[in-house]
Amino acid sequence: MILLLQTFRNEPWIQISLLIVVFIIGIALQKSYNKNILKLETYTNGFSLTLRKNSPFMRLIFLNLTWLIVNLSGIFISFFLFNFVFFYLVNIIDVLLIIANIIIGTLLYMKLYNKELKNSLITITLIQIVLSGIGILLNLFFKVFQTSLSLPDDQVMIYFFEYIISVVITISLTIFFIKYGSKIQLVYETTGLIALTAVIPGLIFISINFLLDPVFIFYNLVQVIIVALAISIILAIILKKLSYRKIPRYDLEEMKALEKGQALLDIEDLKVHYPLLKGVLRKQIGSVKAVDGVSFSIKAGETVGLVGESGCGKTTVALAILGLIEKTSGNLLLKEELLPKDYSRIIRKSIQMVFQDPDASLNPQLKVIDIIAEPLKNILGITNNIKLRKHVLKLLEEVSLKKEHLDRYPHEFSGGQKQRIIIARALACNPELIILDEPTSALDVSVQAQILNLLRDLQRTYNYGFLFITHDLSVVHHIADRIAVMYLGKIVEVGNKKQIFSNPTHPYTKALLASRSEVSEEDREITFVLSGEVPSPINPPPGCSFHPRCYTESYNELCKQESPHKIEVEEGHFIWCVNEEVLRDTHDFVF
């Protein structure tokens, strides 16, 4: 778009026409991705048509419109200087326009795409250099075009404008066709090569016809574009069919039980640090230690509860396991095999997640059948509608939903039903490990019980491994087999449910249990409030990270100097502390 606008910078009417054409084509492209620019809403007394301002294409249009205004201003200034002052000053205006394009483009790019100054400046400068070079080549091509036709400048400009428009339409519609289809996302890596190969014959056809007989093309432009599109699309169909043959197919498997007790996930010294950058050169001045040396394991048929205050790193652990964020160090083993940096579809099939907010986890534009079938298409490569519908219906029945729910949209369901849909989607590929990130926190208490009982029933039947992340101790007491307590990116205590609730040993675990409020009338007062604030993960305190808030009798100066080490309380029950005297601490709590 920017290339075309800058190529015809002396023809404002051509720039405006191009903007309209590309805008229309962009709407068509956005439709294929379910990210509609135009949203039509019907009412009993009429309808309203709204424009989505936050769509990616609208941001691009806004960026180009600003550049267009800048360039049009430069054109008028150049025209004035060329006619009334000095010709050589026009070149200075051109240079100033390029600088203005870079400055304005950088500022807009930072604002619209939330990028940093350095990255934005480099990106826009490179774009400007590349487009200027291509613009020079197009101008040379126009001169050759003009010389070969030996026609007046105005007539050649019209033919050249038609040529550019036909090229833009052919490329855009061919790419639209290539991107369209339920299987294309399975061969997404090859779509660029398919598009390039398919577009070239159509462009060659248009170019040859324009060079041989531009007058004929002037009166038969539509037919030429249709033939060029037909050539490109037929080639695209062949290439897509060939690429689809390389898609690994996996058959739909019936949900089967795992062997209870087998190793599923082992986490060894996991660390996730986010770098802190400063200055124009983005020099690293530190890091946020979101997760700092976490180790635990999950077996088939077992639920491990991960608890702690907000911001202690629970969700970061889950995202690192899923491969959604890059770990700094440590090992993740799935069934005793080290997980690679880039997860294959087999690994994606084995690990699924249920997110906290059901409304944010469901696409409001898709029906339930499409939402649950999405992992079957993307991971298993299955696109047969009859197979998908039968399998999705079985999954809905597993979570106590019915056939009539298949063709409804998410807004037609209650909060508990939405969470059931998300659980059904997680079960779609018959996973082995399911990560549940506070799946009941947004639900009513009665609905929470239904979802928790559903999860326990599914686990009893199929022996899934659950990593249950929550800050609600009553929920984790109901569903977890083992519990790991996190504080400031580290695990401070781990043990089975009975050990943690009956014999909490680490001072933080004691305080966490004592801080909960009860539902009963006589015990509803909070019995203990932990003083102080959680230290910053950017600059954690030396020694034990809990020592600024520690209240125990065993607290001493060593806590400020030495790092905590693993201490066994009893079989299967461990804490990480500096001083073993904490095992004999007699601080009174009411649990």
Image (spheres, rainbow, N blue to C red):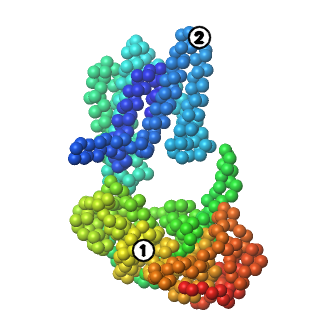
Q: Quadrant of residue 93?
A: top right
Name of the residue lying farthest toward the right: 557
Reading the image, the residue beneath label 2 is: 85
- Residue at horizontal 46 percent and vertical 24 percent from the top: 8
Residue 260, horizontal then vertical, whole percent: 42, 83
Q: Quadrant of residue 14?
A: top left
- Residue at horizontal 60 percent and vertical 67 percent from the top: 291
Q: Secondary structure at mark 1?
A: loop
Q: Secondary structure at mark 2?
A: loop
Compare residues 185 and 231 and report the one nearer the observer: 185
Reading the image, the residue beneath label 1 is: 432
Disc 1 residue type (three-letter): Glu
Residue 118, horizontal then vertical, whole percent: 62, 43
Q: Is residue 332 above or below residue 104?
A: below
Whether pointer 2 and pointer 1 mark residues with C-beta atoms closer than 8 Å, the reply is no
Q: Nearer the viewer, mark 2 or mark 1?
A: 2
In space, the residues marked 2 and 1 are separated at their CA atoms by 77 Å
Q: Quadrant of residue 107?
A: top right
Q: Is residue 13 above or below residue 330?
A: above
Tell me the quadrant of the picture where the C terminus can be found.
bottom right
